[in-house]
Amino acid sequence: MRKQIVAGNWKMNNDLSQTESLISELKKIKKTSHAEVMVAPTFTNLLNAVVALKSSDIEVVAQNMHFAENGAYTGEISASMLKSVGVKTVILGHSERRAYFNETDDMLAKKVDAALANSMRVIFCFGEELADRKSGNHEQVVESQIKNALFHLEASAFQNIVLAYEPVWAIGTGETASPEQAQDMHAFIRKTLSNKYGNTVANSVSILYGGSVKPSNAQEIFSKPDVDGGLIGGAALKATDFFAIVNAF
Ligand code: PEP
């Protein structure tokens, strides 16, 4: 059975005391679904979040990392640094990283390699822009993002990879892909994986949907057979909304 996962990406929001308040709110809410739950605070709050969530079943994950082990990369953070504060999973390839920080498929391939070499789990994000969707190129774009960053990997690496399809036009815009659009793309992604690695691998990889998921639409999106959960931005900043999404499974 594929894992169902709901991950909250807090982006560049919440200072230390706001992070601690949000965590204490999250800890008060009862989880009624089987989904794995993750939250991604900003770098400066990772350690406090790990400590605060230690005896909970909420995993703390990072929003990004560099591919090098260490060295002259001012302002960057390595996999081993994340591990040293108890973080075992990292989000890579978020569209905001690609758009504002020029992250390319090649760079992301290196980041994926570095994370896996450090025995970390990767949530790998990708998705088309509105112009790609309008011109009917969305499948091609998504296929090339996946192939360029991941298809050099051995099949066994996919035990530690979660995919997150996030159409750029749906991120933070209030506009959501319809459940059918999400299902069609997730099925296409699974077929792309299957063509390269076979059905067993393709059927074992969790594929999350991200893009304006909220309590009112989560259940319908998560009911689709190839949607294994969500990567949540805005709605993850409010504990009750986030857990309404987690409990939508
Ligand atoms: C995201 O940034 O990964 C995201 C899905 O954001 P939002 O839920 O706010 O659209």
Image: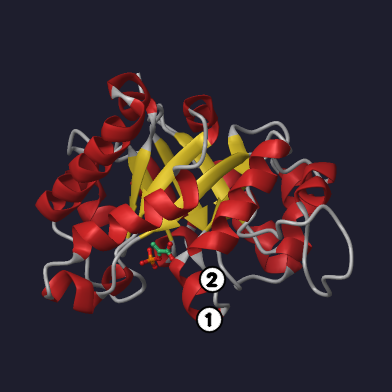
Residue 181 shown left or right of residue 108 in the figure: left
The residue pinned by badge 2 equals 97
Asked if the residue under mark 1 is in contact with the one under mark 2, i.e. CB atoms within 8 Å, the reply is yes
Q: Give me the C-alpha separation between circle 2 and circle 1.
A: 6 Å
Of residues 87 and 193, which is closer to you in this image? 193
Measured along the vertical axis of the image, is residue 204 above or below residue 221?
A: above
Rendered residue at 26%/37% (across/down): 190
Q: Residues within 10 Å of mark 2 (few under 14, many from 20)?
A: some
Measured along the vertical axis of the image, is residue 12 above or below residue 80?
A: below
Q: Is mark 1 within 8 Å of ligand 1?
A: no
Measured along the vertical axis of the image, is residue 147 above or below residue 95?
A: above
The label number, if any, that marks residue 100 in the structure image: 1
Rendered residue at 49%/72% (across/down): 98
SS label for mark 1: helix
Task: Find residue 96 and report its horizontal and vertical position in percent.
Answer: 48, 73
| Residue type for callout 1 | Tyr
Q: Quadrant of the C terminus?
A: top left
SS label for mark 2: helix
Task: Find residue 155 and report its horizontal and vertical position in percent.
Answer: 47, 27
Task: Find residue 73 and report its horizontal and vertical position in percent.
Answer: 82, 70
Residue 213 in view in this figure: no
Locate ligand 1 by image quadrant. bottom left
Residue 246 shown left or right of residue 249 in the figure: right
